[in-house]
Image: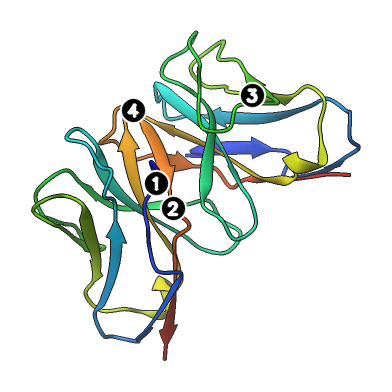
Amino acid sequence: DAKTTQPNSMESNEEEPVHLPCNHSTISGTDYIHWYRQLPSQGPEYVIHGLTSNVNNRMASLAIAEDRKSSTLILHRATLRDAAVYYCIKTTGNQFYFGTGTSLTVIP
Amino acid sequence: IAGITQAPTSQILAAGRRMTLRCTQDMRHNAMYWYRQDLGLGLRLIHYSNTAGTTGKGEVPDGYSVSRANTDDFPLTLASAVPSQTSVYFCASSDGGPYNEQFFGPGTRLTVL
């Protein structure tokens, strides 16, 4: 299977860190890992991406396992606006293979 | 800056009818994509275009066709709609390559009866 595996749902308290896991055991050497999130009734929006090394940006951090078969998206301080479905995506060429995503609930 | 626009926002269509979903981007991106999203599922790639004049098949191309006459526009056509094509359709664009961000439009909700 070319897609990724994620938990269906997770909860976090507001202002606490969130670790969203993803398995991509079929990843090949040139495949990138992207994370996008989708708010209700909107198109997905970019969060972060990486190839081999851990990555940080203003939204999140991405930790990639040494064998690249799994990764974790880290939101350092969850806010209510972070409640969304988070997709871990394996890219082959410029084709995105979405999993079913993790629905994140942020509890005030 | 509009980014990506899609039309119509929503449509109810009788089975067997022909329908074209429109997508336009103003970012001069080389690559464009069409996805469908079914209830509770992630997005699946239907067709893509790496550059104007070229197109390719994604995961679920059957029943759909695309054209890319210029950089900005990437219409998706259902020649004879069937109920299983009821879905939300998203258009996206990027500079191409596996490392570039894809920018998504707001989606078209299509219901085929």
Which residue is at a point 56% across and 55% down the rendered structure image?
B41
Q: Quadrant of residue A47?
A: bottom left
Label number found at residue A3:
1
Q: Are marks 4 and 1 on the same chain?
A: no
Please give the residue where the numbered disc 3 appears in the rendered image: B75
Say which amino acid is labelled 2: Gly
The reply to whether discs 3 and 4 touch (Cβ–Cβ < 8 Å) is no
Label 2 vs label 4: CA separation?
A: 23 Å
Question: Which residue in the structure is indicated by mark 4?
Answer: B95
- Distance between the alpha carbons at the discs numbered 3 and 4: 18 Å
Amino acid type at circle 1 is Lys
- What's the image's color scheme? rainbow
- Residue linked to disc 2: A99
The answer, for residue B109, to whether it is visible in the render is no
Label 3 and label 2: CA atoms lie apart by 25 Å
Under circle 4, the secondary element is loop
**How far, Cα to Cα, is label 1 from label 2?**
6 Å
Give the chain letter at badge 4: B
Q: Amino acid at mark 4?
A: Asp
Q: SS for tag 1?
A: loop
Which quarter of the figure is the C terminus of chain B placed in? top right
Mark 3 belongs to which amino acid? Answer: Pro
